[in-house]
Amino acid sequence: MDAGYHSSDSEQAQRILQECGYELHELGNLCDSISYPGRFKRIYASREHGRPFLTASMMMRFRPESGVNLANLQGQAEKCAVQKDSILITRSGSVGRCVLVGDRLAQFAISDDALRVRVQSLEIPTGYLYAFLSTWIGQALLTKSQYGSAVKHLEPHHATSIPVPVLPLSDLQEIADRVQAAYSLREKANSLLDDATTTFYTGFDLPPFDESLVSYLSPKPHPPSGALRSFAVSSADIGNRLDASYHVPIAETAVSAMESGRYKPIAMEQICSRIFHPGRFKRNYVSERHGVPFMQGSHIPLMRPFGLKYLARSDERNISQCRISSRWVLMTCSGTVGRVGMVSSLADGWAASQHIVRFVAKEPEYNPGYLALFLMTPYGQHQVTSKVYGAVVDELTSDDASRIMIPDPPREIQDAVGNPVIKAFEYKDRANLLEDDAIHALEDRLTMQE
């Protein structure tokens, strides 16, 4: 009885498939299984006794990382394991978003809020099924059966009956190859960032930073995670910040560790020509054809910008103040603060929300890729979180961001760290372009008869 099931998009999608002229097969008949592990009480453990665990939203990130490990006890980690080359589909909250499991994602245990689609047919490549489910046609058919009032859900039997058009084998393979090429670029991008991080620690003579380096008042070894940690602050150091989180010694310890490193730290404002975020204005959203892509804070950590909106080009006065340029470093400064990204040449000229602070490096003296990588390390992240303020919604000002301390190495050392970072974000956006081309090509083939 819910009207969404009978929406015009799903009706149009079904009509297009019926008239496309290609043979149709139910998704369930092309797969070995469509399932999810079911709900159970999760038990978390150390890394050696568990597997890193991701929620459905975290699995959509460009660099999926986890701070918790699902225990091997009672086979929990094994229940939530995913196979390489399978398709994951979000089934709770934002329903229908798809991701292809590669080498990196296969290392994690994934929440039960993701459907696992395991493909058995050698004639229907996994990349093709992924592309079809990512088209607006596949998305309309996936989401039409979602149920629930506040939080939407999807079950395996809803996806099983989705009709899938089977194109000629050469066309299937061409689309699948583009998807695989996109994911290959993402894997290369992550490898570049991993290598750059290793170079940062070794080249700067800095230890990988964690909270075990912090000197709390409690005796060492520190109490287990979650236990009370105490510290003292001199009245002379309180300044105008009375919130305890500002004075937690973890950020101070990070700066002290950098002082002992190979290159002395300086304030971020000394290596940037500008650190700012634009003001607020009324947004006039239009279709993609008539608008400028508008990036929001939630898009920065994602593998690809789902739900991207577009601002009317006619509103040039407002758009000009929020345009972003290639080689700028972006960081969220509202809500979930500290997510870091970089503007590639493909995103040059896009617009970005006022909830994103912009770092413009002083080039050629400083490499923006080095700046971005530093902000992603614990040395940068702990400084960022210590400066956050706000009760309900966390906020970070551009003035506070300008006071973040960062090592000041010679340009050639910066390049060894920063150039791979710049290349990684170029790869990331090229991968999105390849994937979009594959999806749009499939949509064009299916709607050719209209």
Image (cartoon, rainbow, N blue to C red):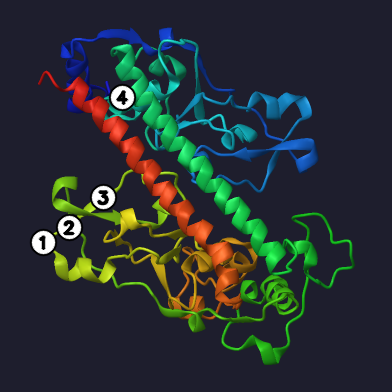
The residue positioned farthest toward the bottom in the image shown: 236
The secondary element bearing badge 2 is classed as: loop
Percent of width and height locating residue 321: 25, 71
Q: CA distance from mark 1 to mark 2?
A: 9 Å
7 to the left or right of 55: left
Q: CA distance from mark 4 to mark 1?
A: 33 Å
Q: Amino acid at mark 1?
A: Ser
The numbered disc on residue 309 is 3
Q: Are marks 3 and 2 in contact (CB under 8 Å)?
A: no
Q: State which mark lies toward you, 3 or 2.
A: 3
Residue at mark 4: 138
The residue positioned farthest toward the front in the image shown: 412
Q: Amino acid at mark 3?
A: Lys
Q: Are marks 1 and 2 in contact (CB under 8 Å)?
A: yes
Q: Amino acid at mark 2?
A: Asn
Q: Quadrant of the N terminus?
A: top left
Q: CA distance from mark 4 to mark 2?
A: 28 Å
Residue at mark 2: 284
Percent of width and height locating residue 113: 51, 31
Residue at mark 1: 314
